[in-house]
Amino acid sequence: MNVPDRRIPGAAALLSVRGLRTEIDTENGTVTAADGVSLDLHGDEVLAVVGESGCGKTMLALSILGLLPRRTGRITGGQVLFRGEDLTQATPARLREIRGADIAMIFQDALTGLHPLQRVGDQIVEMIRAHEPVRRDAARRRAVDLLDLVGIPDPDRRAASFPHELSGGMRQRVMIAMAVALDPAVLIADEPTTALDVTVQAQVLETLARISGDLNGSILLITHDFGVVAGFADRVAVMYAGRLVEQGPVAEVYGRPRHPYTAGLLASMPRIDDIPGRLERIAGTPPSLISPPPGCRFAPRCGFATDLCGELTPQTRLWPADGGVTVACHHAERVGAG
Amino acid sequence: MAHSEASRPFGPETGPLLAVDGLVKHFSTRRATLKAVDGVSFTLEEGGTLGLVGESGCGKSTTARLILRLLEPTAGSVRFRGRELTTLPAAEVRLLRRRLGIVFQDPYASLNPRMTLRNIVGEGLAVWEPRSDIDGRVAGLLERVGLDPAFAGRYPHELSGGQRQRVAIARALAPEPSLLICDEPVSALDVSVQAQILNLLADLRRDLGLTILFISHDLAVVRHVCERVAVMHLGRIVEIGARAQVYDNPRHPYTAALLSAVPVPDPAHRHRRSRVQLAGEVPSPLDPPSGCTFRTRCPHAAERCATEAPELARRGADHPVACHFAADLPLAAQP
Amino acid sequence: MSEQGPGPGGGMGGEAPVGVPDVPMGGGETESLATATPISPWRLALRRFLRRKPAVISVAILGVIVVGATFADQIAPFGALEQDLDAILHGPDGTHLLGTDTLGRDNLSRILHGGRVSLLVGITVALIAGGVGTLIGILAGYYGGLIDATLMRLTDTLLALPGLMVVIIAARLLGDGTWDVVLVLSGIAWMTLARIVRGKVLTLKEREFVEAARALGVPARQIMRRHLLPNLVGEITVTVSLTVAAAILAESTLSFLGLGVSATHTATWGNMLGGNEGFVTTAPWLVWGPGLAIVITALCVNFIGDGLRDSLDPTQGKL
C-alpha cells in the first residue's frame, strides 16, 4: 500500500466499477441490489467487499461478469471497465472470452461450480482447451500441475476423482485451480471459505494468498467476515443496503472507522483475542432493498443520525484528505473522532 | 411426574445440574458405522455456562439431541438433577423435557410456518399449564426477548432472522426450563444481529439464573458466552476447562490449531500471530484413524498416537486433556 | 461450515425496516414490522393462486360444469331417460341442442345428468382417499415400525399389479351401483396419497420446528395435528385434486367397459361413451359430447391442482 496513485480513485485501475446500478426482479418487487457502486481494483492487490447477507455484494460480483440471472436481473446504469473496456456493453461472446481467461470466479459452494459427473482433472482440461489451442495431454499435465499448486496431495490420482469424492476443502482447492488455470488478471472470490470449517478455511485462505502472490493477480474478495478481510485483504469496501459506505486501506478502516456502520460492526463482533463485557450492537435489521429508506440508508439504525441523514443521501468523499479512505456519511468527522 | 421433579426423590440437592457420562451414539448403516458421539463426559453446574465447540461433524449437535432424548443414545448416562434420563420410559421423557429448553441454529427451519407467534410461543404453556393466562404470558415472553407483544398474531415469514431467533428463545423459555441448550443459535445470523442475540442470552442468564449449554463452531462466540469450554473432535472431547485455561493455555494440539485458525478482525494481527497450520483433511467419522483421531493432522503425532487412544484425564483434574503429550508440548498461548 | 444454514434475510426482499432507538435491554427494546396487519400463509397462498391464470380460468369453467350437473333437474331441457321417439339419432338442432341418441334421449340433458354421477364419484373418491391416505401416511411416517412396513408392502404389491385389472376384477365382484364404483376406486386411490404423505412426514419430522415441539414435550397426537398436518396441506390438496380427475376418468373407463354404473337407470359420461362408441362416424355428437365433458373436467382439475401446488408451497418466499 505504498503506491501513492492508488489513493486517487480511478487512476489506472485494472478493473473499475463506475456508478453501477443493478436491479433484480423478485416476487415481491424490484430490488436495487447495487445502487451507484464505484470501486477500483488495481493490479496485484486484494480488495475485499464486505457486508451482511442481502446487502447486494454477490449481485455486484455477478454484475461484473455479466452473470446476472437472465430474465430477472439487469444493469440499469454505470460502467464496468476492465482494462478500459466497458463490460456492460460487451456481447455475450466477448464476455465468455473474458470469463475464465481474464476474470475468473470462485463461488461459495464448489459443488455448484463443478460438474458432478465429470472427473475434476477433465474439467480443468476442458476449461483450458476451451480458451487455448493446446493438445489434450499438454492440458492434462497443466491440470495436474495446477492441482499440485493449490496443495492437493497426490494430484495425479486426485485428477481422476469426481467432485463428490472430495472433501469441501479439496473441492474449493479444485475451484481455485480451475480459476487460475488460464492465469487471469482478476480473480473474483465470492465467500470462498464460508462453507468450510475454520481449520480448513485457514488452509484455503493461505493457498489463495500464496497463489495470488505467485501469479501477480488481483483478487476481489466478497465476504461477510471481517476477520477474513483483516487477515487477507489490502483494501476493504464496506457495503450496506446496496451502497458502498466506506472504502480504504484495511489498516486505516479497521483502526479508525469513519462510517457508523463499519464502527458498529467492528464493535459488535465477539473476538477471540479479548472478552468484552458486553457487545456493542447495532439495533434493528437491514432495510428492504425494494423500498429503502430515503437519504442515508443506515440512518434508521444509526446513533449519529440527524434530520439531515433522513433527507439527503450523503456524498462519497475522501476524509481526511490524506487517509486514503472514502466515506459516505454526513457525520464522518464525528464518527472518526470517537 | 412434575411432583417428583419438585421433591427430587432420586437425587441429591447438591451436585451438578447435568452430568453426562460416557455418552455414545453410533448410527449404523448396512455398510458402515458412524460413531457420531463416542464417549462424551462432562458436568454442568447449576447456573453455569458450558461451551461445546468443534468443527462440523464432531458430534456436538448430536450430543444436544441425546441429552434431550430427541435421539436414543447407544450407551452412556445422562443425569439431570441426579435423575438418569437415558432409561426413563418415553412417557416420562416427555414430562422431563419441560425442564430442558432448546434453541436451534436455523430460525427459518425452527418455527412452524403455519403457526402464529402466539401459538408458537404459547405451545409449551398450553401443554404444561393449559389453565394459565396464555395470551398474557406470551405477551410477557415476547417483551422479555425484545419483541413487541403486538406481534403475537404474526406469522414467522413476516419476521427477519434475528426476530425469529428471539421467538425461538421465547418459546424455549415458556415452560421455565432450568437448562437451556443453544445449538449454534447465532451461526445463521449476520454479525450485527448476532450481537443482539448474544446480549439477549446474557441478560436472560443473569435475570433468570439459567444454566446454558452452548454449542457452536465459533470459538470467538463461545469465548464471549461461556465460563467453561469443552473442545470436541470426531465424537470425543479432547480438552475441557475454564475459559481462561482453554483459550490462554491450550494443552491439546487441536485446540491450539483451532484457536490460531480463527480470523481476528484486526489487520495488525496478521504478522504477529503464530500460526499452527494443520496439514491434511478432517478425517471422515465413518472411518476415523486408529488411536488418537487427531493424529493424522497433528504436528506432534508420534508412534504411540496410532496405537493407543488417549483418555481424557480422570475426573478431578480441573483441565483434562486427551493427549499423550499434553504435559510436554510447547503450545503457543493465544494470541 | 457445512452446518451453517441459509444466510439470514433469505431473499433480499422482506426484511422489516426498523427504526428503533438503541435502548439498553430490560424489556424496553422492541422492534416493529413492515406491514400493519398480519398476513397468514393461507392468505398469501390465495393471492399467489389468483395470479395463476390457467388455474383461475379452470376454476370458472369447473364451476359452470358443477353448477350444470348439480342443477341438472332444473337446467336440462329434458330428463335423462326421457325419450323423444320422433327424434331418434337426430343431429344438433333447435330442440335438441346436442342431438339425440338411438333411443331418442336428449344428449345435452344426459350430459348434464351424467355429470352429476361422474363428479360425485370423482369428488367422493378423492375425499375418502384423501382422508384415509392422510391418516395412514402420517401415522406410518411419524411412527415408522409395523404400520409403516405394512403400508409399504401393501402399496408395493398393488403397484406391481396392473391397476386397471385390479379395478376390473374388484368391479366384477361388487355390484354396478354408483357406490360400488366409489368403493372400488377409493380402495386403490388412497395408497398414492399415503405414500406421498409418508414421504413428506419423514422429512418434516426431521425439521427443527418438529424437534422443537418434541423438545417442549408436546404430545405426539398434537405434533401430528398442529405441526405435520398444516404443512402437508399442499401435497394433500394437490394429490386429492388430481385424484378427482383420475377417478372421473377411471369411472368413465369402467362404465365404458360396462363394468361401472349401469346404463339402464343412470347416465354417466363413461357409459354414454361406451353405449355410443359405434356412432363415432355416423353420429359424432354422441361421442364428442361426453368425451369433451370428461376431458375438459379432468384438464380443469389438473390445472387447479398445479396452481395449488405452486401457491401452497411455503418455501416460495414471501409476497
Image: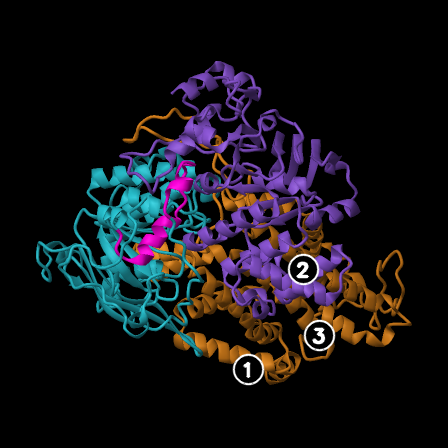
> Toward which corner of the image does residue A22 lie, by quadrant?
top right
Q: Give the range drawn in magenta.
A: B250-274
Q: Give the answer, above or below, for where B54 lies relative to C172.
A: above
Q: Nearer the viewer, residue B107 or A108?
A: A108
Q: What residue did someone put label 1 on?
A: C157
Which residue does the image show at 26% across and 63% down from the upper left?
B323
Query: Chain ID for label 3?
Result: C
Q: Would residue A19 appear left or right of B175 to someone viewing this image?
A: right
Kind of residue indicated by mark 2: Asn
Mark 3 → mark 2, Cα distance in angstroms: 18 Å
Q: Chain B is drawn in which colour?
A: cyan
Q: Would residue A325 appear left or right of A91 to someone viewing this image?
A: left
Q: Is-magenta flag for residue B273?
A: yes
Image coordinates of residue C53 in percent, x first then y, are 70, 47
Image coordinates of residue B235 in percent, x first then y, are 33, 64
Q: What residue did someone put label 3 on?
A: C253
Q: Colour of chain A?
A: purple
